[in-house]
Amino acid sequence: MDWLTRHLDSWGLTWWQVLAGVLISVITFVASIAVVTFVLVKLPPNYFHSSHERDFLVDRHRALRWTGIIAKNLFGLVLVFFGVVMSLPGVPGQGVLTILLGIMLLDFPGKRNLETKLVGRPKVFRMINRLREKFGKPPLFLD
């Protein structure tokens, strides 16, 4: 313990800062799992099927629609960024699923193929459907 205290001092850290870092890490881990779970459970079972329409705010005023599209894409970029960070070793969180959520919000050519490729990974697909089953939702289906 003395060795650790000396190293913390040499790095300019206090025990309170280390504790705060651990708490922030735990809170972000729990929050990421909660958000990912909520979104994946709320998705319609055919979301990743080609028959599912993806138009966003089509019946709204043009200015509101464009504002919504820009905000949705910015939030998607933030999620992809944090998903990449959470995919790094030693960083807690659901990296691949957070990247998937970010991609689902972004608008770019080839998006559906990329989503299907990510969700179609057997491990990811099984985990998503097990999660949905726990909440009494039907499994997702792909093309």
Image (spheres, rainbow, N blue to C red):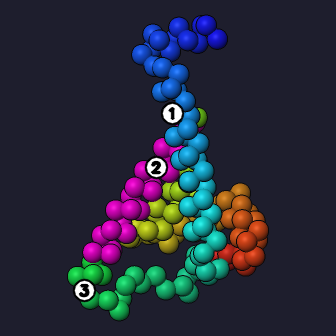
Q: Which residues are magenta?
A: 67-89
CB-based contact (under 8 Å), mark 3 and mark 1:
no
Amino acid carrying label 2: it is Phe
Q: Residues within 10 Å of mark 3 (few under 14, many from 20)?
A: few
Residue assigned mark 2:
82
Please, which residue is most extreme toward the bottom here? Answer: 59
Q: Which of the pair 107/102 is nearer the observer?
A: 102
Residue assigned mark 1:
20
| Residue 85 in view in this figure | yes
Whichever of labels 1 and 2 marks the residue nearer the N terminus, that label is 1
Circle nearer the viewer, 1 or 2: 1
Residue assigned mark 3:
62
Q: Is residue 29 left or right of residue 102?
A: right
Amino acid carrying label 1: it is Ala
Residue 68 pos. (x, y %): 32, 75
Q: Is residue 78 above or below residue 105?
A: above
Q: Secondary structure at mark 1?
A: helix
Q: Secondary structure at mark 2?
A: helix
Amino acid carrying label 3: it is Arg
Residue 125 pos. (x, y %): 69, 64
Q: Residues within 10 Å of mark 1 (few under 14, many from 20)?
A: few
Residue 119 pos. (x, y %): 61, 65
* Main SS of residues in magenta: helix
Whichever of labels 3 and 1 marks the residue nearer the N terminus, that label is 1
Q: Residues within 10 Å of mark 2 (few under 14, many from 20)?
A: some
Residue 123 pos. (x, y %): 71, 57
Q: Which of the pair 37/19 is nearer the observer?
A: 19
Is residue 106 covered in magenta? no
Q: Is residue 51 above or below residue 13?
A: below
Q: Quadrant of the N terminus?
A: top right
Q: Alpha-carbon distance for marks 3 and 2?
A: 30 Å
